Image (cartoon, helix red, strand yellow):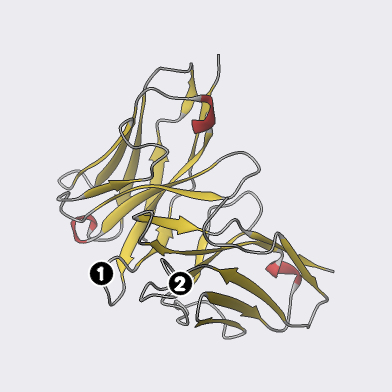
Amino acid sequence: QVQLVESGGGVVEPGRSLRLSCAASGFSFRSYGMDWVRQAPGKGLEWVAIIWYDGSNQFYADSVKGRFTISRDNSKNTLFLQMNSLRVEDTAVYYCARVVKYQLPLNFYMDVWGKGTTVTVSS
Amino acid sequence: QSVLTQPPSVSGAPGQRVTISCTGSSSNIETTYDVNWYQQLPGTAPKLLIYGNTNRPSGVPDRISGSKSGTSASLGITGLQAEDEAAYYCQSYDSTLRSWVFGGGTKLTVL
C-alpha cells in the first residue's frame, strides 16, 4: 500500500543540525512532488518546504529559508530535510506528504501523509 | 497569524450540520488558487478531505462537502457523528508570500 515513513527526529541543542528522511513505498515516487509540513506542540499545521518530482525546484517557508534544505533521491525513493542552525521554535512534529498538482500551476494538495517524526530543539 | 482565517472552534450535536469557514484575500482564495481541507484526528497525521475546493477523494463520505466563493471557502459536514470530532485545516497558495499556507485550524466538538 501507499506509505510514507519519516525518521531522523530527536533532541538537539540550538544551533545544531539534524537530517530527516522520509521513505516512500507503494507508488511511483519519482512521479510526485513531495513536501514537509510541521506542527509545533499544541499548534496548527505549518508548510515548510516543497520539491518538484524531479528535484528541479525547491521552495521554502520564510521561517526556514536559508537554514533548511529539501532534497530527494529518486533511486532510493527517499525524501530528505536537512535542518541547520536549529532554533527552539523549530520544535515540532515533522510530516512528509505526497503532493498532487490539480489543474492549474501551484494548485497542489497533499494526499498521502506519513505519521511524522518529532524534533525537539532544547538546551 | 495565518493569512487564512478559521474560527478556533465549532460544535454541533450528533446528526446536525456544521460549517467551518476559511477566509482569505485577493492573494490567495479569491484568485485561481484552490482550497483544500484536511482532517486531523487527535494524535494522528492529517488526512485529505476535500481538494480543488469541492472534490472528495475516494473513501470520504458524501456528507462532507466543500465550497468556495469570493475570498472565502467553507467545509460542510452533515449528519454529525462522534468520529467527526477532530481539528480541520484549510490550505491554499498565497501569491504575496509565494508560499503554500494553512489556516489556523478549527476544533470541531460533537456535543
Q: Nearer the viewer, residue B72 or A55?
A: B72
Cα gap from disc 2 to disc 1, whole angstroms: 14 Å
Task: Have a look at marks 2 and 1 and say if they share a chain.
Answer: no
Q: Is residue A28 above or below residue B61?
A: above
Q: Nearer the viewer, residue A83 or A89?
A: A89
Q: Which mark is residue B19?
A: none
Q: Nearer the viewer, mark 2 or mark 1?
A: 2
Residue B18 in the image: state x and y as whole percent: 72, 78
Q: Is residue B55 above or below residue B84?
A: below
In the visual, does A64 lie left or right of A54?
right
**Under tag 1, what secondary structure?**
loop
Residue designated by label 2: B29
Q: Quadrant of residue A20?
A: top left
- Name the subunit of mark 2: B
How many marks the image carries: the answer is: 2
Q: What is the crowding at mark 1: few (fewer than 14 residues within 10 Å), some, or many (at least 20)? A: few
Residue designated by label 1: A105
**Under tag 2, what secondary structure?**
loop
Residue B1 in the image: state x and y as whole percent: 58, 50
Q: Amino acid at mark 2?
A: Ile
The residue lying at 38 percent from left, 53 percent from top is B97
